[in-house]
Image: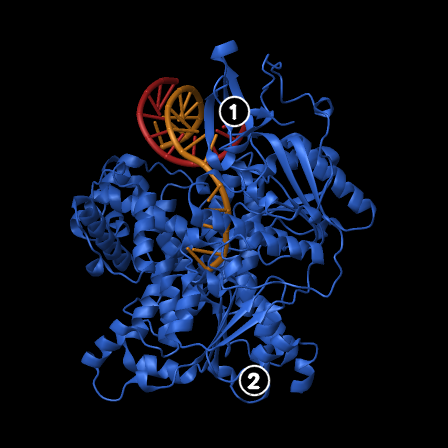
Chain colours: A blue, B orange, C red
Amino acid sequence: MSSSLLTGLNPEQLAAVTLPAVPALILAGAGSGKTRVLTTRIAWLLTTGQASQHGILAVTFTNKAAKEMLTRISAQLPINARSLWVGTFHGLCNRLLRLHWKDAGLPQTFQILDTADQLAAIKRLLKALNIDDEKYPPRDLMHYINAQKEEGRRPAEVEAWDDYTRQLKQLYEEYERQCRREGVVDFAELLLRSYELLRDNAPLRGHYNARFRYILVDEFQDTNRLQYKWLKLLAGKGDELGSLLSRVSAPGPLAAQTTPAAVFAVGDDDQSIYAFRGANVGNMADFQRDFAVDTVIRLEQNYRSQGNILDAANALIAHNRGRLGKNLWTEAGAGDPIRVFEAASDFEEAQFVVDEVKQLHRDGESLSEMAVLYRSNAQSRVLEHALFQAGLPYRVYGGLRFFERQEIKHALAYLRLIANPEDDNALLRVINFPARGIGNRTLEILGESARGGGVSIWQAACSGGAGRSAAAVGKFVTLIEGMRAQMEGLSLPELVQLAIEQSGLIEFYRNDKEGQDRLENLEQLVSAAARFVQENEDSVTDFLTQASLEAGEHEAAPGQDALQLMSVHAAKGLEFHAVFLTGLEEGLFPHDNSINDPEAIEEERRLAYVAITRARKRLYISLAQSRMLHGQTRFAIASRFLSEIPEDLLKWLNRGYAPAAMPARQIERSTPEHGMRVGASVEHPKFGMGVVVDYDGMGKNANVQVNFGAAGVKWLALEYAKLTLVS
DNA sequence: TAACAGAGAAAAAAA
DNA sequence: TTCTCTGTTA
């Protein structure tokens, strides 16, 4: 049985899959069969009887990855999906907290705030405390609080050195109080609370240490500090502070005496592209040190891309310093060169993509096997326009997901309110939606009376005293109580139906001339609830939890064969026959905001590496000399990343094109006497290559403004600056 | 209370 | 350019 499981694995994959119970770091390059190794290892542990379904925990970052893993395992073995702990960090923490809500100090039916809910809660807090939100922008405060939690710090552990930080700390504390009062937890809290639960409860920790002997981690390079600390605790590696605490509070035999679980960490430092949201690549080194890892396996054979594409990726990423080190190779041939197109404008670039896609499609490639990637979502507009004109079907990834849509959030807020009237967030969301005559003034009065009495807004609303709008508020209270009275004996989908009808949401969107899509989404919500009770229990809390933890897919409904448009971030983990990597310009990719920070540049480079390694057979790289950005035409030079790819791998499709062949659109200014027209390429002995952005003055007073990319944008006096015209 | 106009900002994103 | 937020006006 296990022999068939292992056939087709290469030596490194086989070694990883069949490792004994030791901590191991698997450096899995792009396209090296990482998911296969993870799932086969689980299947192998189970079939050889080394572990029971009970004893394995596997953690990922996205629901998609978790589902994929479960699907693949069950294709190899009959498993009980419930007894296997496979899920996202947040999903697994939620599972722990639901099981041990009492020990964790949470109400049994605690609700989960997503980012938008959290921000709303913080705004409300600032208003209640009368804090100037100019001085303490809600968004900044949210980041501050989340950052503290991700470092594992409660307000008591936060250092404050001046009035400003003391205030931040104070606000963090008030925010926690508010969450506790309302019975809600945010995403970071799921992690932190679950971490503290294990840290402070020695028997419980001992139980899970004894249970999960095998812990597998996917995308390890994306873990943040708290996630790593959580893993350490769960693996029985203790936490200096934690074991100290438990030694004081629980003398006697310690859980720390159990042998640590075998942590199988799979990651790729070269694909670490989420530092901006707290990912800490340093966890890979920490892991090796803390767990005394002496098994590091490199998966370097790539099964996805052809040679030239891999060579380009390897050469590019070699410019980063401090890598753990890896070099992808393939048995496939070199394949096509990388096609490079330098367009005069973003319009021309889009047209190029359209023409090539059409050609490939004519040659028999399906559109869904082709992707257009860009650094920032704003770039999709021009592309979409050109694709639309050409009548090519396309699908854009990004934007709002199903459970993030306003109509869905409104409907869920009614459900939340029925389930828990103390939920001020939910109440404020819908008390006047659809409009029922309860305005700001009324809400202020309600808010003050709630605060004064130390009660929820719901209770304040029930006790009347809402000023002139008392009648409207009373009607709202009656509405919600009416719904709650009727929910007895209703199934979840029936309850959803009831909520969207009686709240007036359906009627509101029916009368709204742009509400058609929203109506359909509300209907889909009822179907989603019906599906949920088939696959799970008929529980409102569980449904609301899933809605918070799984906001749904980013893509538009799949239907016909369509070209895929997405940001490079969104493309991670995917692969395509042909990839168009667009906008390879200084200032865009790498982005302006990264240009002065060497670490940020390295992350941009890893991002480019991820983009390149998405392609199987064909890779196109394009750039535009001029581009409409923020309503203005900007000129840029080619990205440094392009010059970091060996020339012999590149095939320039239009190098040395005649400016006359450029579409009329962009350069309307005539060429000045010195020849440095806007858009011209120039070279400076110190600043290197640049592009002329503007000029003024004549003769001895002539100045030109040049964008040198990395060296910045500079005004230079032509008389003194040693500028030479290149093109 | 709701609609509207003007100002200001604009990288990426999972749970 | 286009979206979001805020303050003003009907």
Of helix, strand and loop, which one carries label 2? helix
The kind of residue tagged 2 is Leu
* Tag 2 subunit: A
Residue farthest along the right direction in this orientation: A363
Q: Are marks 1 and 2 in contact (CB under 8 Å)?
A: no
Q: Residue A722 carries which label?
A: 1
A661 lies left or right of A637:
right
The residue at the point 16 percent across, 48 percent down is A452
* Tag 1 subunit: A
Residue A190 at x, y percent in the picture: 36, 63
Cα distance between the residues tagged 1 and 2: 70 Å
Q: Name the residue under label 2.
A: A46
Q: Is residue A179 positioned above or below A634 on the image?
A: below
Q: Nearer the viewer, residue A563 or A41?
A: A41
Q: Is residue A543 positioned above or below A121 on the image?
A: below
Of circles 1 and 2, which is in front?
Answer: 1
The quarter of the picture where the N terminus of chain A appears is bottom right
The kind of residue tagged 1 is Lys
Instruction: Please indicate, yes or no, whether residue A95 appears anywhere in the rendered image.
Output: no
The residue at the point 30 percent across, 72 percent down is A197
Instruction: Please indicate, yes or no, whether residue A355 appears anywhere in the rendered image.
Output: yes
Say few, some or many: other residues with alpha carbon within 10 Å of mark 1 (under 14 / 14 to 19 / 20 or more): few
Say few, some or many: other residues with alpha carbon within 10 Å of mark 2 (under 14 / 14 to 19 / 20 or more): some
Residue A280 at x, y percent in the picture: 41, 59
Residue A59 at x, y percent in the picture: 48, 69
Mark 1 or mark 2, earlier in chain: 2
Q: Which of A209 and A550 is in front in this view?
A: A209
